[in-house]
Image (cartoon, rainbow, N blue to C red):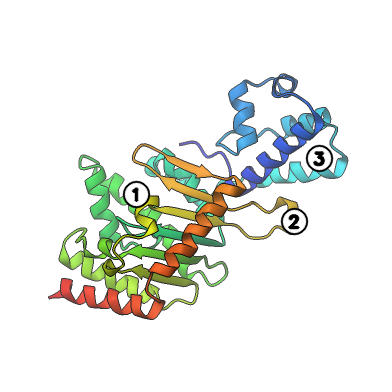
Amino acid sequence: MTPTGSTLPQRVLARQLRTLRETSGVSAETARLAIGVGKQTLWRMETGQPVRLNPLFIERLCQVYGAGDNVTSMLLALTEEAGRAGWWHAYGDAIPKHMDLFVGLEAAAKRIVSYQIALLPGIFQTVDYRRAITWIDAPQMPTAEVERRIGVFARRKMRLTDIYNPIAVDAILDECLLHRAIGGPAVMADQLEHLASLSDLPNVSLRVVPRSAQAYVGLSVGPFVILEFPRHPTVHLTEPPVVYLQGFTGALFLEKVEEVQQYRQIHVDLQRSALDEADSRYLICEIAKKYAI
């Protein structure tokens, strides 16, 4: 996997380029011909997909769109920032293609809201829990490659306890996933003890929907993650929230305001079904004891 730049500034740049073109009335065909690229390349530039960003292309597009000097300078600065490789690029192909964008966005996010029904959020997983999942997903994968993937997860988890840039996590879990002994009883006991300790962190909210809740809205909606990003000094450059839905062969990112709002409402509904944080922690500790016997 070839590094193509930092995810968040690339997405902000894409949104600004798309807005400029649409506001100016310039067609996508005219824009791509102006910089000599294919339709796919321009689409990637305007949607924040992995693509090499040439400052000369950005400057030329600004001319075609009639952008002022201030706007052009701002977009060139974003281009420079987007060209800096993120930490995850050092792991190359250890990150599956459909996860690369998510990892980049997670690294830039200030807060994530996560609802899970089958597996724990990656940022909460212990090394042994993650290793067990990796072996299930790819039983023929060489051990060295498995460990490289484990390294990615270990790096992601560092944000939870980062003194200068901690990520806030609001997680709701279905109790059933706590009873699935991923990696065996000993691994799961350690995982749940780790989970309980994470719930003590001031930037982590962890709540469980108990089995006694029976049918509730989350079962029909399925797992999801909402990523929220820090406010940019220039307000209109602040990246709006994104909903991430992971599938078996790929992933879906929802960005429309109405779509994000629907998932925010679902999160509110889930909170009504979940135990409070104290009771959730107690339940996690009680289940952990059963694994430890």
Q: Amino acid at mark 1?
A: Arg
The answer to whether one can see residue 10 in this image is: yes
Q: Tag 1's secondary structure?
A: helix
| Residue 262, x across and y down, in percent | 53, 52
- The local crowd at label 1, few if under 14, some if 14 to 19, many if 20 or more residues have their Cα within 10 Å, is some
Q: Residue at x 21, y 58 (%)?
A: 182
> Disc 1, disc 2: CB below 8 Å?
no
Left or right: 192 as drawn, with respect to 185 = right
Cα separation, mark 1 vs mark 2, equals 38 Å
- Which numbered dot is residue 235? 2
Q: Which residue is mark 3?
A: 72
| Residue 132, x across and y down, in percent | 23, 54
Q: Residue at x 52, y 40 (%)?
A: 3
Q: Which residue is mark 1?
A: 148
Q: Amino acid at mark 2?
A: Val
In depth, the one of 22 and 214 nearer the eye is: 214
Cα separation, mark 1 vs mark 3, equals 40 Å
Q: Residue at x 77, y 36 (%)?
A: 20
| First reached walking from the N terminus: tag 1 or tag 2 | 1
